[in-house]
Structures are given as structure tokens and as C-alpha cells.
Image (cartoon, rainbow, N blue to C red):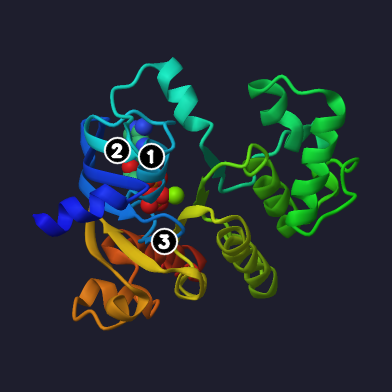
């Protein structure tokens, strides 16, 4: 108890018994985790385990049906939209598929937040955008359109947009999904640079084992809407839990995934010739 209070006293993100129910299903069944200032914590878990839902609750995009989420001194569950807007400004979100506006240039995409949230003169907005693009290694790309970007570049523009208002917290959803290993390692490097250069506190949702063990200060594994284990990479690696071990060795895909894979195999099997 004293330990939990001590941790919550210093944590920048503190999630307690988070619940989310939708479509008659309990999707989050009491998720608790915390992120200390300056930490990178990864939420790992199989597809459908509740990672994105947890992240969206923390980012104020999904309203939980129970529990508490503390962002610093603010408990955001049950806040009004107006109150939430103030908290959202302190959290940058990097979405799974970059989620750039296709009809806007890179400049307009990154300038979106500063334009909407703060009344800044145009030259200041230009300076902010240039600085953020430089930080993600894409200086001078202002006039490109999303269709002209590679997958890795799009992710980096998504990151530049997330840091446009210099938030102390960054929330990433599958930042390396769909990237080849080399580009993924560049993105991993950037996530660590955000911590090391800017002191950002990060929560990263991922099922990419290589990335998770490369960037995490601590790892929380979600399984069927609950935290199965939370600890340092070494502690997670040493876990005797079979589900944890199967996941980190890339062997487990759970009964649903297995059924899907069997179904896919059945689809590609050549048709049997019947004698009728
Ligand atoms: N608003 C919703 N209504 C109904 N089901 C949902 C909703 N949001 C998420 N789910 C379901 O909850 C489960 C967990 O989803 P998600 O958090 O996206 O998983 P993950 O990111 O770990 O793959 C999935 O089965 C998903 O279909
Ligand atoms: Mg997800």
C-alpha cells in the first residue's frame, strides 16, 4: 500500500483499475499501470487484448466506464470536454497509421495543433514546424503531401505533429507497425531521443517484440483486458508465466489467432476432387 501510494505520488501517468465496457463486453477489466516522469513504458500484448483502448482512454479519446486516470494532478475520468481539452494539450498522440490529413501538406499537418489551440503569428508557426521537422530528421519537407512520403517518413511527420505543442507526454500506438526492421529501428531511436533530448514521458503500445525490448524502461503486458505482468525488460524476460514467454518468443497467437491461421491454411489448400 505504501509502495503504491509512493509510486502514484510521483507518477506522471497513473491508471487505476481502468474499465471499459462496450457492445455488452467487458473489454478492459481493471487495468492498472503507471509511468514515471521521463520513462518509456511499453504496453505489449496480442492483437485485440485492449492496448489501443487503454491508450485512447488515457489520451482522453475514449471514455472509460470505470476506474481512474491521473495525468499529473488531474484525474481525467468523468471530466467535461472543456476540461479534457486542457489535458489533451499536454499529451501528444502518435496514431497507428500516422493519420495525416491527405489533402494538407506536411507543413499544414504539423501546424494543425498550434493553429487550432494557440493563436500564434505565422512566422512563429513556421519556426515551430521547421524545428519539429528537424527533430524528426525531416528538415525541409514542408511542401510535400502525405502521398509523397514513405511509410517511415509518414510516421515521423506524425511524430512531428504530436510534438508540435511540446507536450510533456507522448502516447504512441504501434509506431513501428508496417515498417521494415531498419526503418523501425530509426523510429525506435526517435522515441528514445524524445525522452533523452526533450525529457518526454512516453507510453508506447506495441506488439513488436524487438522494438519493445529495445526502447522500454518498463513493460506492461495486457492480456484479455488485464495486466498480466508489469516490470523491467529483465523482469519480464525472466517471467515464468507461459503466456508471457510465448508472447515474447513470438510463438503464441492465442486460440482466436490460431483458429484464424487454420482457416487461412484451409483457404489455400487445393480443393479436393470428389468422385461424384
Ligand atoms: N467501442 C468499441 N465497441 C466494441 N468493441 C470494441 C470497442 N473498442 C474496442 N473494442 C474491442 O475491444 C477489443 C480490444 O481492442 P483494442 O484495444 O483495439 O485491442 P489491441 O489494440 O490490443 O489490438 C477488440 O476485440 C475490439 O474489437
Ligand atoms: Mg491496437
CB under 8 Å between discs 1 and 2: yes
Quadrant location of residue 150? bottom right
* Left or right position of 124 against 26: right
Does the numbered disc 2 mark a residue whose Cβ is under 8 Å from ligand 1? no
Q: Report the mark closest to the observer, 3 or 2.
A: 2
The residue drawn where x is 53% and y is 53% is: 200
Image coordinates of residue 21 in percent, x first then y, are: 24, 33
Residue 262, image x, y percentages: 37, 67
Q: Which residue is mark 1?
A: 58
Question: Residue 32 in the image: x percent, y percent?
Answer: 23, 50
Q: Residue at x 36, y 76 (%)?
A: 233
**Which residue is label 3 attached to?**
42
Image quarter of the N terminus: bottom left
**Which circle's residue, 1 or 3, is located before the other in the chain?**
3
Q: Is residue 259 left or right of residue 131?
A: left
Give residue 234's position: percent from left, percent from top.
33, 81
Amino acid at each position: 500500500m505504501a509502495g503504491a501510494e509512493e509510486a502514484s505520488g510521483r507518477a506522471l501517468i497513473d491508471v487505476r483499475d481502468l474499465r471499459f465496457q462496450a457492445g455488452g463486453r467487458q473489454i478492459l477489466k481493471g487495468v492498472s499501470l503507471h509511468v514515471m516522469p521521463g520513462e518509456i513504458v511499453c504496453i505489449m500484448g496480442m492483437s485485440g487484448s485492449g492496448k489501443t483502448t487503454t491508450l485512447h482512454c488515457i489520451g482522453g479519446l475514449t471514455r472509460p466506464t470505470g476506474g481512474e486516470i491521473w495525468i499529473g494532478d488531474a484525474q481525467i475520468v468523468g471530466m467535461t470536454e472543456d476540461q479534457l481539452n486542457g489535458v489533451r494539450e499536454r499529451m501528444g498522440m502518435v496514431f497507428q497509421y500516422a493519420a495525416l490529413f491527405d489533402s494538407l501538406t506536411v507543413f499544414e499537418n504539423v501546424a494543425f495543433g498550434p493553429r487550432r489551440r494557440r493563436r500564434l503569428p505565422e512566422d512563429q508557426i513556421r519556426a515551430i514546424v521547421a524545428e519539429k521537422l528537424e527533430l524528426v530528421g525531416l528538415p525541409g519537407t514542408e511542401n510535400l503531401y502525405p502521398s509523397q512520403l514513405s511509410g517511415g517518413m509518414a510516421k515521423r511527420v506524425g511524430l512531428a505533429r504530436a510534438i508540435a505543442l511540446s507536450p510533456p507526454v507522448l502516447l504512441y500506438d504501434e509506431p513501428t507497425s508496417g515498417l521494415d526492421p531498419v526503418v523501425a529501428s530509426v523510429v525506435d531511436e526517435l522515441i528514445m531521443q524524445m525522452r533523452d533530448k526533450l525529457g518526454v514521458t512516453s507510453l508506447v503500445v506495441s506488439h513488436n517484440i524487438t522494438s519493445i525490448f529495445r526502447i522500454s524502461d518498463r513493460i506492461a503486458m495486457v492480456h484479455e483486458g488485464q495486466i498480466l505482468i508489469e516490470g523491467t525488460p529483465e523482469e519480464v524476460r525472466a517471467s515464468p508465466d507461459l503466456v508471457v514467454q510465448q508472447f515474447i518468443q513470438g510463438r503464441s497467437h492465442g486460440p482466436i489467432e490460431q483458429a484464424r491461421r487454420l482457416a487461412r491454411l484451409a483457404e489455400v489448400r487445393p480443393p479436393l476432387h470428389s468422385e461424384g
